[in-house]
Amino acid sequence: MTASADPAIAIPNLLYSYAMHFDDGDFGSAAALFDKGTVIVGDHHIAGRTAILALWQQWVKTYDGRPLTRHLVTNPIIDLHDTGDTATCRSQWTVMQAAPGFPLQVVATGRYHDRFGRDAEGWHFVTREYLQVDLVGDSSAHLIQPMTQRA
């Protein structure tokens, strides 16, 4: 895949690539998107592919290697900084799941706050902050520990 220099294409592609890899159960490829970045959860900054991969493996239930989810990332508001090589993006997410014994349902919704950088290799995540969870459904088939709503 050729990386686009156009942030209007490249940044949404990063958002959607994360969701697709995650839903495919390819947590390694999702974590690789953060090779130059950090995931922020509350006060914890998790850096590096191995640490991020371990985080998700500790959080997410899988069924034959897949979480049986669909992460819908919507409403990206991208702010390209004057330098042209950094940007921020606020977006919303909705996780749906159809696990064995459960109907297709919304598990939760929330918000991301991302920072991106561009170097010779193209655009990449600098940080992804799991900013907040807005609405929580039944997450028992999706997460190893229950999800809580944050204001």
Image (tube, grey):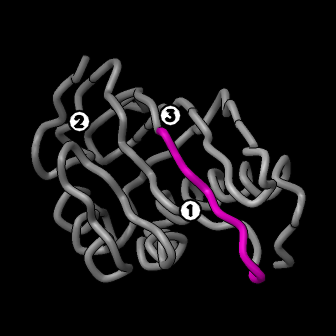
Q: CA distance from mark 3 to mark 1?
A: 17 Å
Circle 1 sits in a helix, a strand or a loop, which is it?
strand
Q: Which mark is residue 139?
A: 2
Q: Which residue lies under the disc numbered 3?
A: 93
Q: Quadrant of the N terminus?
A: bottom right
Res 89 quadrant in image: top right
Of circles 3 and 1, the one toward us is 1
For the point 17% across and 39% down, which residue is it? Answer: 140
| Direction from residue 45 to residue 26 in the image, left or right | right
Region in magenta: 113-121
Mark nearer the N terminus (2 vs 1): 1
Of circles 2 and 1, the one toward us is 1
How far across and how far down the image is residue 35, in percent? 48, 78
The residue closer to the viewer here, 81 or 65, is 81
Give the residue type at disc 1.
Answer: Phe
| Direction from residue 29 to residue 3 in the image, left or right | right
Of circles 3 and 2, the one toward us is 3
Q: Is residue 39 above or below residue 2?
A: above
For the point 84% across and 52% down, which residue is it? Answer: 9
Give the residue type at disc 2.
Answer: Ser
For the point 77% across and 82% down, which residue is it? Answer: 120
Residue that extends furthest to the front in the rendered view of this protein: 83
Mark nearer the N terminus (3 vs 2): 3
Disc 2 crowd, CA 10 A, few/some/many (<14, 14-19, 20+): many
How far across and how far down the image is residue 97, in percent? 41, 40
Disc 1 crowd, CA 10 A, few/some/many (<14, 14-19, 20+): many
Q: Which mark is residue 16?
A: none
Circle 3 sits in a helix, a strand or a loop, which is it?
strand
Residue that extends furthest to the left in the rendered view of this protein: 145
Say if the magenta span includes residue 119.
Answer: yes
How far across and how far down the image is residue 134, in percent? 34, 19
Q: Which residue lies under the disc numbered 1?
A: 125
